[in-house]
Image: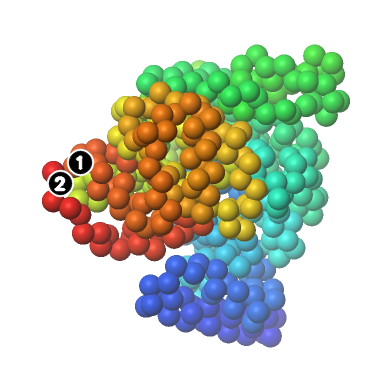
């Protein structure tokens, strides 16, 4: 970095930090504005990452789970006494990543790791500025078709990013056939589950598998299908099959946590690792397996990893737990059929006393809400409690619930999101649990008032 580049970088850095402090003072939730300013003042602002990282730059992408996976990995690395730059709020386009760098970087210093969540479509742009050491890909599902197109289009975008760095090492979910061809010329490290056991009262999904074919165009056959198109697959026509994982897991899924056993490839059985993950659902077990696999690969001890898992605090909206005057709230972002179905699968009498679903169709949510008909809302047809529905597309969601077989008399539509949230909170008693399932912009709106903890509860006990 020459003198002019350094001057440009630090000018942009201090300007972004000033804007961030100003936003904090006025309690604004704008997470990307400092980054927008930084990139305007220094077009190569993000190139700084590659120059001052002492160990590894890790990028994380995929349709579902990238925010939680990145958060888990960053927390594990920090627990191991590393300095880590991480876009922890999930702002994963260039401006959001630049904001996180500007806000968290200590001037004139170096850091050990960067853990950067990246939007699938922006990964190739990010790689124009940084040379990542690792890429972790969680999965590929249909998501916001009006923005991303079909799965093979998204896979091609990720491959275009990989092509820019032949030395890139890639962590890949072995159980997702859509990832089979990614980075075939690079060093690949696979993780996946060999066995999944449920010890939960949650309903099993009956949703059909997403239509994913082998590259030879034949249908895939599954020895075991865990959800959607994720599982132990093979092709009877060409012989392609799910890769043998380098980090092979077995998981026991309980209502409120999971137990994961991991065996490294070529290791003795005596070296099997055990972890308790305080997050709900199989989808979060996959996120944890990905983060743990990367941490072990980086040489972090299992003891430190378990410490980190125990103390991990979820990012807002990603299985985040809140408590309002003794009432327990779990916030679970939903944005596509597979993600929503997996959250719905966790709902039972032990996990949820009340339910609030908030559906928006702003640009960041995806304008096309037809995905609601592909999500497995039929899992709620026997749910015995009332359901509140809110958001711009509240009535679309109410119609979906009717056709899912849910009792219409138990549906309450409250279009205003703030009113709906606090009404739902006030409908439960102390010690009871409310699950809120919002789309992305609804989540951002909720964040503005939920974090203030200012709701005047009724006197109901």
**Location of residue 411 with respect to 3 vertically, above or below:** above
Give coordinates of residue 313: x percent, y percent. Answer: 37, 48
Mark 2 vs 1, N-terminal side: 1
Tag 2 and tag 1, C-beta contact below 8 Å: yes
Q: Residue 257: percent from the left, percent from the top? A: 37, 31
Q: Quadrant of the C terminus?
A: top left
Residue 358 visible, this angle? yes
Residue bearing the label numbered 2? 460
**In which quarter of the view is residue 42 placed?**
bottom right
SS under mark 1: loop
Q: Determine which residue is flagged by label 1.
A: 429
* Foreground residue among 432 and 390: 390
**Which residue is drawn at the image coordinates 75% and 42% (left, top)?**
150
Q: Quadrant of residue 308?
A: top left
The vertical placement of 372 against 403, above or below, is below
> Residue 256 placed where, x, y %?
35, 32
Residue at image location 44% in from the left, 49% down from the top: 390
Between 13 and 125, the one nearer to me in the picture: 125
């Amino acid at each position: 970095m020459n003198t002019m580049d350094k001057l440009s970088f630090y000018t942009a850095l201090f300007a972004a930090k000033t804007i961030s402090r100003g936003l904090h003072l006025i309690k604004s939730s704008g997470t990307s504005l400092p980054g927008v300013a930084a990139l305007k003042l220094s077009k190569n602002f993000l190139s700084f990452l590659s120059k001052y990282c002492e160990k590894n730059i890790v990028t994380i992408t995929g349709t579902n789970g990238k925010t939680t996976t990145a958060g888990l990995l960053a927390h594990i690395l920090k627990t191991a006494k590393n300095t880590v730059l991480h876009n922890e709020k999930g702002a994963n386009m260039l401006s959001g990543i630049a904001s996180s760098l500007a806000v968290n970087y200590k001037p004139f210093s170096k850091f050990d790791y960067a853990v950067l969540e990246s939007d699938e479509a922006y990964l190739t742009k990010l790689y124009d500025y940084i040379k990542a050491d690792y890429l972790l890909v969680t999965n590929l599902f249909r998501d916001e078709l009006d923005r991303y197109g079909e799965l093979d289009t998204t896979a091609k975008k990720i491959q275009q990013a990989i092509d820019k760095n032949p030395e890139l090492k890639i962590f890949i979910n072995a159980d997702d056939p859509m990832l089979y061809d990614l980075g075939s010329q690079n060093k690949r490290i696979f993780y996946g589950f060999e066995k999944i056991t449920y010890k939960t009262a949650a309903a099993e999904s009956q949703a059909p598998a997403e239509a994913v074919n082998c590259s030879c165009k034949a249908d895939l056959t599954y020895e075991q299908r865990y959800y959607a198109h994720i599982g132990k697959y093979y092709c009877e026509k060409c012989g392609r099959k799910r890769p043998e994982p380098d980090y092979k897991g077995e998981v026991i899924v309980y209502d409120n946590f999971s137990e994961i056993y991991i065996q490294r490839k070529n290791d003795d059985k005596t070296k099997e690792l055990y972890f308790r993950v305080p997050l709900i659902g199989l989808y979060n077990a996959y996120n944890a397996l990905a983060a743990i696999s990367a941490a072990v690969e980086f040489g972090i001890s299992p003891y430190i990893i378990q410490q980190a898992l125990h103390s991990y605090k979820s990012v807002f909206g990603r299985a985040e737990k809140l408590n309002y005057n003794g009432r327990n709230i779990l916030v679970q972002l939903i944005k596509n059929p597979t993600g929503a179905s997996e959250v719905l699968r966790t709902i039972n009498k032990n996990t949820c006393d009340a339910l609030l679903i908030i559906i928006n169709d702003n640009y960041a949510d995806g304008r096309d809400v037809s995905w609601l008909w592909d999500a497995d809302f039929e899992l709620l047809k026997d749910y015995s409690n009332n359901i509140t529905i809110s958001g711009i597309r509240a009535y679309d969601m109410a119609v979906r619930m009717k056709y899912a077989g849910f009792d219409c008399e138990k549906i309450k539509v409250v279009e205003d999101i703030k009113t709906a949230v606090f009404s739902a909170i006030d409908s439960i008693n102390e010690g009871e649990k409310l699950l809120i399932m919002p789309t992305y912009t609804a989540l951002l709106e909720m964040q503005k008032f939920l974090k203030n903890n200012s709701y005047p509860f009724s006197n109901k006990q």
